[in-house]
């Protein structure tokens, strides 16, 4: 009897193993990587599963049978199957969670074919009869148009019929007359199909860009797995270099994956590349519908795509012959998933490049310290671009001391110096980008009488004051809890509520009050709730419908607006003092990116950086755009304190609704971990901290504790953490998770 070993999708890590099922004769097409449905557990619930092995067995007593199999075109290729195994081993996730990351949701719903959209396509029942029909006295103008069209084309689809002004009812009538036959044709849902390929202009490179391109081309032509760090200052033209290399790869009939860190970047990026490569571009990100993601996946699998653009999930695109993978703004933390599988797109890209013997390019003006360290050590090839394209100067940046503003009586989030720069914009016909990494109107509400802070009832974070046309309210940015703005303190009853800190809403109000003629556009999570919001707002700003684009981090990322000559940071200190060893790196990167948005065309750029710590070295170096000095300073500190890249960090987290039971479970976990270390890897250098409270101790009603381990990840230490996940008893409602090299501590 033929038996399949399968991994069910949806089981927890402790139960993640191969299970044997009988294959009946009607399922002869099953192979390794096939998607099947199996009865699982005592209740025989229907689970999707992936076939991992096949064998012949005589003893099949007690084995259940596979219920069904999906078409082979929906199965995992050998490469994608091995990728799922890689994710399982390197992120300590169930195999099924790895498969969920690799495949679109529609493929795991138990009926992939039902998600395929089909449209009618009409053909002449007898092509030879068309001239006679046209010669007859047909009274219907619609009938004549259809027949005339089919005399020159083999078939007619719904879109062509609509362009002729022919209705579905009229086409159905022609089928009844016996003139046409109809069949269903699969159609791909593609929200970006509106872009049309333009003239493919030659890309002219500067001397520095040509040198960078030549270095990357040499790496690509080795046809071995290679990695390069394209380190270019803001505005140096990294995209032009990458695009010219894409031309080379696509001309050789190989495929390219281009990843961007934010959905906000995809409209601008898609527009550039679709106009160059036409409909052989697929876009993959989380805001697509299930049907759109499924069809993008199918187009890739069927060889209809040369270039995939998307966020981190695009790294799993099922392309047959990848020649080039690019991570733009590679330093961004969004390339790391915080849900199982907790993968970093950088690691997946390297794994796929090894399989395809492809080139991976990590591009950034402010590379992650780990990437620059690898380039310094020769693991990556460093390819620098140290000048702005076209001889343009980097923006001049000045630091404004907000303490002096307070002493002068200015409590506004807009300093006098920034206000002076903003007042000049309309007359000059120029624009500005202002960055404030805080949503809402005020950051904190407190009682002046007793000091009470208004916190979320579900999370250990303060509520943020929001003000809209429909009224004022408090909002938790962690769980979304909302409540009306109170009139008095719930603790002491005093009507002495005070507001602290400014968010983007307040900054928008201040700008509108002080500069009534200045058109301000606010871009944050409150104004971009739909997938079309980003694109429409960015296009409106590009078209000159606003003078100022004010927003959170989404305004800092990779945008290129020719009329922007002023960039401003309203408070540079927000991310600087977070209890995270990457706080300095993130602050430097954010400030550098914001400053770099100005002066990217023919007009000179200027930046104003507002801060309460003007003497801080990180802020000063960001204003100078001096990454290499920052890197030398920060890497020495990392080496001294033993932080990545000089070690790996593992975070073990526990969460639960009952605080005391969670704390008891955390003490048991600490003892269990210490015993496992002594038993399994006594010679491995390891430093264990905790258990202690997470930065946000209570989130969405759940308490959270964690342990931090500094170690070197290898087969031995991975096996240790795998054992913790498999063997530590899950009791008292506490949920355990392990994150290897988290980007947020």
Image (cartoon, helix red, strand yellow):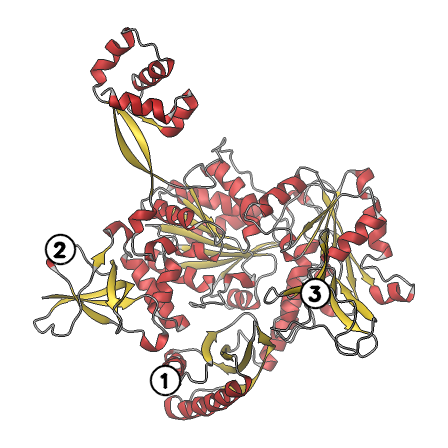
Can residue 402 be seen at all in this image of the molecule?
yes
Foreground residue among 740 and 504: 504
- Residue at 46% across / 61% down in the picture? 345
Q: Viewer-nearest of labels 1 and 2?
A: 2
Residues at marks 3 and 2, CA–CA distance in whole angstroms:
60 Å
> Which quarter of the picture shows residue 36?
bottom left
Residue at label 1?
727
Report helix, strand or loop for mark 2: helix
The local crowd at label 2, few if under 14, some if 14 to 19, many if 20 or more residues have their Cα within 10 Å, is: few
Q: Along the polypeptide, which appears first: circle 1 or circle 3?
A: 3
Q: Residue furthest right?
A: 408
Q: Is residue 566 above or below residue 723?
A: above
Residue at label 3?
464
Foreground residue among 104 and 732: 732
Report helix, strand or loop for mark 1: helix
Residue 147 placement, left or right of 600:
left
> Which quarter of the picture shows residue 676?
bottom left
Whole-percent x and y of residue 418?
82, 53
The quarter of the rendered structure image containing the C terminus is bottom right
Q: How many marks?
A: 3
Report helix, strand or loop for mark 3: strand
Residue at label 2?
26
- Residue at 80% across / 59% down in the picture? 413
Q: Along the polypeptide, which appears first: circle 3 or circle 2?
A: 2
Can residue 210 be seen at all in this image of the molecule?
no
Q: Along the polypeptide, which appears first: circle 1 or circle 2?
A: 2
Residue 421 placement, left or right of 361:
right
């Amino acid at each position: 009897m033929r038996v399949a070993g399968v991994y069910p999708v949806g089981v927890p890590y402790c139960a993640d193993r191969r299970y044997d099922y009988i294959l009946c004769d009607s399922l002869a097409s099953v192979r390794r990587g096939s998607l099947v449905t199996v009865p699982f557990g005592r209740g025989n619930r229907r689970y999707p599963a992936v076939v991992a092995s096949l064998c012949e067995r005589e003893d099949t007593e007690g084995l259940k049978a596979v219920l069904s199999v999906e078409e082979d075109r929906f199965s995992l290729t050998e490469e994608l199957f091995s990728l799922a195994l890689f994710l399982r081993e390197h992120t300590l996730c169930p195999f099924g969670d790895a498969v969920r990351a690799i495949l679109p949701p529609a493929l795991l719903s138990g009926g992939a074919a039902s998600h395929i959209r089909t449209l009618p396509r009409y053909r002449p029942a007898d092509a030879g009869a068309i001239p006679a029909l046209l010669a007859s006295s047909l009274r219907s103008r619609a009938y004549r148009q259809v027949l005339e069209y089919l005399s020159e084309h083999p078939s007619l689809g719904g879109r062509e019929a609509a362009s002729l002004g022919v209705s579905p009812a009229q086409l159905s009538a022609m089928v009844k007359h016996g003139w046409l036959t109809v069949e269903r044709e699969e159609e791909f849902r593609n929200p970006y199909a509106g872009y049309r390929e333009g003239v493919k202009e030659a890309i002219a490179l500067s001397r520095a860009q040509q040198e960078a391109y030549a270095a990357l081309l040499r790496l690509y032509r080795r046809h071995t797995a290679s990695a390069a760090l394209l380190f270019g200052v803001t505005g140096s033209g990294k995209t032009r270099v990458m695009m010219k290399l894409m031309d080379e790869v696509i001309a050789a009939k190989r495929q390219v994956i281009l990843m961007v860190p934010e959905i906000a970047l995809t409209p601008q990026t898609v527009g550039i590349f679709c106009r160059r490569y036409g409909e052989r571009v697929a876009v993959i990100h989380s805001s697509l519908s299930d049907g759109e993601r499924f069809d993008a996946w199918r187009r890739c699998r069927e060889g209809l795509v040369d270039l995939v653009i998307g966020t981190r999930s695009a790294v799993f695109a099922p392309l047959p012959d990848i020649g080039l993978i690019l991570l733009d703004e590679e330093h961004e933390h969004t390339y790391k998933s915080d849900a199982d599988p907790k993968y970093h797109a950088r690691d997946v890209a390297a794994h796929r490049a090894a399989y395809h013997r492809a080139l991976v390019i990590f591009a950034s003006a402010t590379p992650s310290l780990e990437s620059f360290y690898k380039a310094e050590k020769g693991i990556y090839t460093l390819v620098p671009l140290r000048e702005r394209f076209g001889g343009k100067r980097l923006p001049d940046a000045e630091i404004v001391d907000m303490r002096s503003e307070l002493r002068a009586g200015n409590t506004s989030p807009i300093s006098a110096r920034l206000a002076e720069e903003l007042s000049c914009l309309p007359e000059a016909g120029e624009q500005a980008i202002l960055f404030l990494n805080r949503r809402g109107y005020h950051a904190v509400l407190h009682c002046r009488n007793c000091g009470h802070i208004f916190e979320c009832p579900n999370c250990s974070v303060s509520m943020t004051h929001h003000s809209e046309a429909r009224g004022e309210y408090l909002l938790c940015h962690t769980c979304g809890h909302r409540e009306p703005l109170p009139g008095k303190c719930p603790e002491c009853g005093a009507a002495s509520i005070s507001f602290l800190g400014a968010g983007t809403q307040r900054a928008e109000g201040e700008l509108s009050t002080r500069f009534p003629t200045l058109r301000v556009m606010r871009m944050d999570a409150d104004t971009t709730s739909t997938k079309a919001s980003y694109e429409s707002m960015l296009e409106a700003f590009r078209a000159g419908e606003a003078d100022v684009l004010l927003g959170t981090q989404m305004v800092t990322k990779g945008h290129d607006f020719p009329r922007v000559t002023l960039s401003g940071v309203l408070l540079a200190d927000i991310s600087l003092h977070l209890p995270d060893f990457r706080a300095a790196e993130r602050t430097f990167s954010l400030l550098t990116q914001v400053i770099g948005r100005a002066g990217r065309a023919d007009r000179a750029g200027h930046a104003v950086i507002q801060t309460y710590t003007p003497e801080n070295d990180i802020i000063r170096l960001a204003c100078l755009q001096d990454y290499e000095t920052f890197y030398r300073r920060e890497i020495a500190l990392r080496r001294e304190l033993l932080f990545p890249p000089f070690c790996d960090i593992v975070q073990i987290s526990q969460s639960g609704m009952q605080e005391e039971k969670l704390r008891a479970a955390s003490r048991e976990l600490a003892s269990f971990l210490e015993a496992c270390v002594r038993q399994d890897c006594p010679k491995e250098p390891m430093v264990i901290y905790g258990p202690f409270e997470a930065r946000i101790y209570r989130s969405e009603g759940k308490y959270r504790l964690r342990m931090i381990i500094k170690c070197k990840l290898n087969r031995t230490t991975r096996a240790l953490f795998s054992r913790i996940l498999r063997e530590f008893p899950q009791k008292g409602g506490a949920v355990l998770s392990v994150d290897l090299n988290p980007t947020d501590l």
